[in-house]
Image: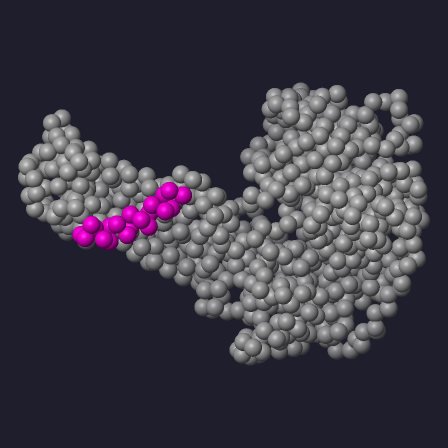
Amino acid sequence: MVKLSHRMSRSATEPVLAVKDLSVILSREGRPSRVIDNISFDMFPCEIVALVGESGSGKTSIGLALQGLLPREYLPRVAGSIRLAGTELVGAGGRTWRSARRHLVRAIPQDPMGALNPTMTIRHQMRESNGGSERSIKDWLARTGLADPDRIADALPHRLSGGQRQRVLIAMAMMARPKLLIADEPTTALDVTIQAQILDLLRDLTREQQTAILFVTHDLSVAASLADRVLVLYAGRIVEMGRIQDVARNAAHPYSAGLLAARFDLDSDRRRPLPTLPGERAPLINVASACSYAPRCPIAQPDCMAIRPPLEAASAHGGAVACLHQEQTPLLSTQRADAKPWPAVAVQETAALRLSNVRKTYPTGTRSFWGRRQSQPVLRSVNLTIKPGECVALVGESGAGKSTLLRIAAGLEAPESGTVTRFDKLGPQVVFQDPVATLTPWLTIGEQIGERLRGVSLDSEYGRRRVGEAIKLVGLDPVLMDALPAEISVGQCQRAVLARAVIVPPSLLLCDEPISAMDVSLAATTLNLLSDLRRQLDMAMLFVTHDLAAARIIADRIAVLKDGELVEVADPDAIIAAPQSAYTRSLIAAMPSLPAGGGR
Amino acid sequence: MTGRPGQDTPARPRFNWRDFFRRAGWLESIGIVGVPVVTVLAVLAPWITPFDPQLRVAGAYLPPSAGHWFGTDEIGRDLFSRIILGVRYTWLSGLAVIGFTLIVGSLVGLISGLMGGKVDLVVERIVDLFIVLPSTLIALAFVAAVGPGLVNTMIALAIFWWPWYARISHDEIRRLKARPHVEAARMAGVRGPRLLLRYLLPGVVPALLIGASLDLANVIMTLSLMSFLGLGLPAPAPELGAMTSRTLDSLTVHWWLPILPAAIIFFLCLLANLAGDGIRAALRGA
């Protein structure tokens, strides 16, 4: 383990957490795989450390390993050492772990609803978890910024909003005054404006309570707005660590540099494709003696496949990096030849979709025996026209009615009043949020993509050829035609879903939050692919998202939806430069971003 | 997307017997193998009995021995051969009841689940009605009324068994219909029978299979109970339940006569339950 200069200033304090040579092997379907590979790091009181990596990098497993909660069905084998506040936890018995989980390490989950017992009041659950007095429960709820702690304490979880639930969980965790708090993507399930508030709250509470936070995230900009230090994880190894400003400005590992470049925000160039990480994670044969990033690395040399790079002092900043050719990394940003700008879209002045005065209400609450349910308006008189070839992004928070509007446009639901006019015989196609869930698990990719050809021709030879073409069009290997969805990665599933949508190009493509569950690089890749396809195939597009930055990059116009009403429809750059409504301003203000000068 | 740890390498979901048995567990695997084996034995029963089960082949009341494994009964018939034939009646009629109710019940459930609306509402209330009736009691009354006999017993059972499968398939269809992949298939233009057969049915089958395999033991138990109470085949037929009840009074003298048929009923139920547990464990993982 390298001694790092910025730690010297803290040498007076003992680390609260010391992880040394930690390895975790999980067995799935009888095949062992090393999800955490020999990592070491320290954490000090009051410190916020971000653990950044893409899906499958092992970041969730580290969080679970520190709580002794690795899933038992995967037969976890843990080696190395975890010392938490002086207690060795690797190999410790159930009693030690239980005590550690109660007093030393607490966690805030990604999904606040799943972490609360739906049948117990908040007060009851807080008492279970901490045994605190009535006063301290109220006190802690108030401290997390909940306006009416008495009401909240007596409520059942389903009566609270997502943000309130996450605050309750933070109160519950911090009430135990833990030495270490593990926050695994605590804000991904929340709206942007709430996200910023939760991050602020976490920062204030740790300073006050001297708690260290391990903040697990795939989003470097969220990490940067909160953390002091960052650990970049790739394939279970730490590839770079250092102060967050250092890494964000002068990334020393090609992977960190790639992650930073793939990140997009309100200032990214929207006239050309976004930079992305090359390829997807590929398994290595001689992984023990090679750099695991080598197959994807743009600056890989022959020795990268022969030597496992040690974590050593970085030349670019005060941290450490595991790269044999770290001096080459800065060249990456200059090397990245500017991609060709997107061709201009020929938007016609007719309409591909016209929604006029669309209204929709949903029944809510309990129903009396004979009575009718009360109804809650979701959409109040929405008017929106999408021209052929144009992309309109629909932005708003959860509950604003975005998805309902998309489902009405798709014809999956009928509006209560108002009219939906589509100007093409061929119906619109929909790309749903979770690509894996929208593929039928027992049918091959090719069978599902070919389903849309049945309206055109039943000839199977012709069908296979067309499916092959569509698969190539979205950048997949035609070999995958015969694969089942579970055999391919999330990114490949997303491409297969797109291939099904465009094999017979619709004049209107509807996308429902297609990137909200993806990590940065995959999101950028998907945005590029969508931008490319809609131009090639001349499709109009409705892109529903809660992410203003993504909306700005893909769309020709942005429509902001709040409480079922369109509050603003305008050109993306105009809307961000001069938002007309207070709501749009709050959305823009809440966007997390890297410290000035970072990333580019 | 963070989620379950270690999920970066997708598992190969292609069917593989080794994985299937590993997930089921070794004891349960015995059940899964045992059910088809017993079925084959039951079908072949008339040809594999060591002695003619209907004829006197030795002295009466011989205890179990190397020549007659399960001993002989009151008129010198070989008990082992009679039990093999009894297994045939009980096991095959159990399978028939399950098979018949499975088809009828799941068809009703599938249709009402697919159609939804008023039809669904009415069918579901009828299903509810059948489920809340005290089934065993009414089945007994039914057989007593129309007269004892194997076919009558099976009909009585079937009347009260199909609603459970209707309920399972209905709920599964409703659940699947709202899933994104079915919605996506509908947007891709898949309709009618094709949607049902390719996109919905394969998702319903595992739940029905689990339900049916766990029910087999139940049906065998109920059939044996009816035959124990004298509502099955008439006297000379070797039914396991009836054999137990007819010889119960000689329990202290000729213990093998009531005990061994009862033990075989127990063994069949155990096998069926193990198979059900195993199939559930194996399919729920997949």
Q: Which residues are magenta?
A: B29-48
Q: Is residue A470 above or below residue A407?
A: below
* Residue at the image position 71 percent from the left and 47 percent from the top: A286
Residue B214 visible within the image: no
Left or right: residue B18 versus residue B47 is right
Q: Is residue B33 magenta?
A: yes
Judged by its main secondary structure, the magenta piece is helix
Residue B113 visible within the image: yes
User: In this figure, which colouring scheme has been used for the structure?
Assistant: one colour
* Residue at the image position 25 percent from the left and 40 percent from the top: B265
Q: Is residue B247 above or below residue A544?
A: above
Left or right: residue A597 versus residue A540 is right
Q: Is residue A140 magenta?
A: no
Front residue (pair A128, B78): B78
- Where residue A128 sits: x, y (%)? 61, 25
How many marks the image carries: the answer is 0
Question: Residue A265's image quarter?
Answer: bottom right
- Where residue A152 sits: x, y (%)? 66, 33
Question: Residue A50's image quarter?
Answer: top right
Left or right: residue B86 versus residue B176 is left
* Residue at the image position 6 percent from the left and 36 percent from the top: B60
- Where residue A595 sits: x, y (%)? 90, 45
Q: Is residue B120 above or below residue A357?
A: above
- Where residue B65 sits: x, y (%)? 16, 34
* Residue at the image position 69 percent from the left and 50 percent from the top: A285
